[in-house]
Amino acid sequence: MTKAELIDKISSGAKLSKADASKALDSILNSIKGALKKGQKVTLVGFGTFSVSKRKARKGRNPRTGDVISIPARKTPKFTAGKTLKEAVK
């Protein structure tokens, strides 16, 4: 499902215009991004939890040359599905 298809589903399900549904979806996504940027967790009960995971610095290999390279530490977004979502997908 694309973002446009999701907007269509939101607008028909909530009886909103597509413009309002798009603004609502963008607002939700921006709120989640903002919370993750601050290092906070976002929990949607029954759906799942968005959080930030820290990856340590490590050594890797350049696949083209085989040279050893240093991969710096970084933060990555993580999603853990909730129980209800897991059961719905079975």
Image (cartoon, helix red, strand yellow):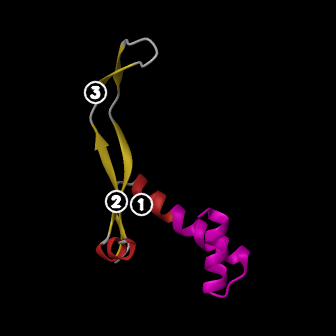
* Front residue (pair 56, 90): 90
Q: Given the image, on which type of amino acid does mark 1 rest?
A: Ala
**Label 1, on which residue?**
35
User: What is the x, y in percent for residue 44?
Assistant: 38, 73
Give the residue at the far bottom of this rendering.
Answer: 15
Q: Main secondary structure of the magenta part?
A: helix
Q: What's the distance in space between the residues labelled 2 and 1, CA to CA?
A: 5 Å
Quadrant containing the N terminus is bottom right
Q: Secondary structure at mark 3?
A: strand
Residue 58 marker: 3
Residues tagged 1 and 3 counted as in contact (Cβ below 8 A): no
Q: Secondary structure at mark 1?
A: helix
**Label 2, on which residue?**
40
Q: Crowdedness of circle 2 by 10 Å Cα count: few (<14), some, many (20+)?
A: some
Q: Is residue 53 magenta?
A: no
User: What is the x, y in percent for residue 13?
Assistant: 61, 85
Q: What's the distance in space between the residues labelled 2 and 3, CA to CA?
A: 25 Å
Residues tagged 2 and 1 counted as in contact (Cβ below 8 A): yes
* Residue numbers of the magenta segment: 1-30
Quadrant containing the C terminus is bottom left
Q: Earlier in the sequence, mark 2 or mark 1?
A: 1
Q: Given the image, on which type of amino acid does mark 2 rest?
A: Gln
Give the residue at the far front of this rendering.
Answer: 90
Q: Given the image, on which type of amino acid does mark 3 rest?
A: Arg
Residue in the picture at 67% in, 75% down: 8
Whether residue 12 is situated above or below residue 61 in the rendered picture:
below
